[in-house]
Image (cartoon, grey):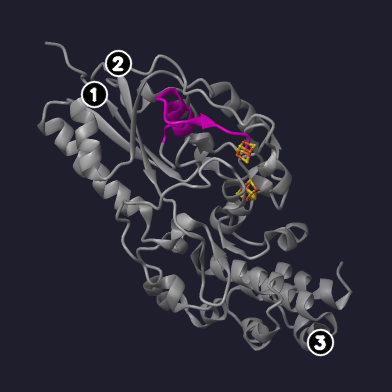
Amino acid sequence: MSSDPLIPYRELAREAGFDLLGVAPAEPPATGPELEAWLGAGYHADMAWIERQRERLLDPRRVLPAARTILCLGISHARPPAEFRGGGRVARYAAHRDYHNAIGNELRRWVRKLVERGLAGEARAVVDAGPVLERAHAARAGLGFIGRSANLLHHRYGPWLFLAEVLIDRELPAEPKNAPGSCGTCTACVDLCPTRAIVADRVVDARRCISYWTIEAKGFVPRELRRSFGPWVFGCDVCSEVCPFGSRAPATGFDFGHHPALESFRLEDLFALDEPAFAAAFAGSALRRPGRSGLLRNAAIALANLARRDAWPTLVRALDDGDPVVRGHAAWALGELDRDQARRELAPRAAGETEPRAREEMQQILGDAP
Ligand code: SF4
Ligand code: SF4
């Protein structure tokens, strides 16, 4: 009697709470040339780790030489929009406890079970920024297609999926070809991206992307981009929210665990946190990723974009923050909220500002920038 060899894998995936499982051969991904072109154009900004992983991204057998199959898992993170108390948007996936921990732990347990049950000999799990071109393999495994926004789009969950992969040394019947699907005539993500970061089909220039700037990038945000960030403090969901795919995605059933940060803080409360308090408040949350410096920088930009005039005293106090990135962005935010009053506030401070970039921010508002 022959039976589907994927059944035990599917059963284990369901038990673990994973929504989707697909199978792809452990072969170089079809989008390898696109990755090369993207890196060549510098669209990865200063994410040097992508460059360092180039060889492994282009061939999963460099991650696990014995790999024959990639088990591609999809976990829905569809949920309502997320924001700090009083406003300041956060990418929906970051509203829970850090998904790296939740999914990583579950994935490690899952791999142990695969090995215990003889469903894999050698196995290696990868989640998020790991050395696998996950959207390409997921598309090959039938989980969806890659849309203009470069997101993987599933017919039911749309872009609201975390992807994870397990490379195993077993040969399993893969999908015959990529999942069908196309954006058709839709260009909503391209047209509505606040910073025009989608520069071609499936090509996002990270140097213009709000997600890159608010999560990955250190230091000062280019002034010409700040207004376009709108209310976003961590990440950006615009290209996912405008996508017709997944607009009716059911809420996630995966238990990511609750994190209290969003309901605990208003944006202005963040400025009262020193490094140890910040580390304690955001332990276990993806929001700690940009660090105190990055998150307060983003909060200052959002306060200006949200026209939060009531946050004026907070931003004035932030001019004395120990971090020049915070001082510089607080100065910019004050200038956006009320240029004349900001000039009165900044005039006595600019000359005493010792950090050149923060001083330049102040001088811009005072009108005597070099
Ligand atoms: S995440 Fe936001 S900024 Fe980045 S491409 Fe999508 S819509 Fe544009
Ligand atoms: S918004 Fe439209 S163009 Fe963009 S990924 Fe979704 S379907 Fe494709």
Residue behind label 2 places its C-beta within 8 angstroms of ligand 2 = no
Mark 1 residue element: loop
For label 3, the residue is 341
Could you tell me the amino acid type at mark 3? Gln
Stretch of the chain drawn in magenta: 131-148
Any part of residue 278 in sight: no
Any part of residue 369 in sight: yes
For label 2, the residue is 173
CB atoms of marks 1 and 3 within 8 Å: no
Point 54% across, 67% down: residue: 295
Q: Earlier in the sequence, mark 2 or mark 3?
A: 2
Question: Residue 98 at what x, y percent from top left?
Answer: 37, 57
Residue 179 colored in magenta in the image: no
Q: Which mark is residue 6?
A: 1
Point 51% across, 83% down: residue: 272
Left or right: 217 as drawn, with respect to 139 = right
Q: Which residue lies furthest to the top in this view?
A: 1
Task: Relative to 266, say whether 12 is above or below.
Answer: above
| Separation of marks 1 and 3 at Cα, in angstroms | 66 Å
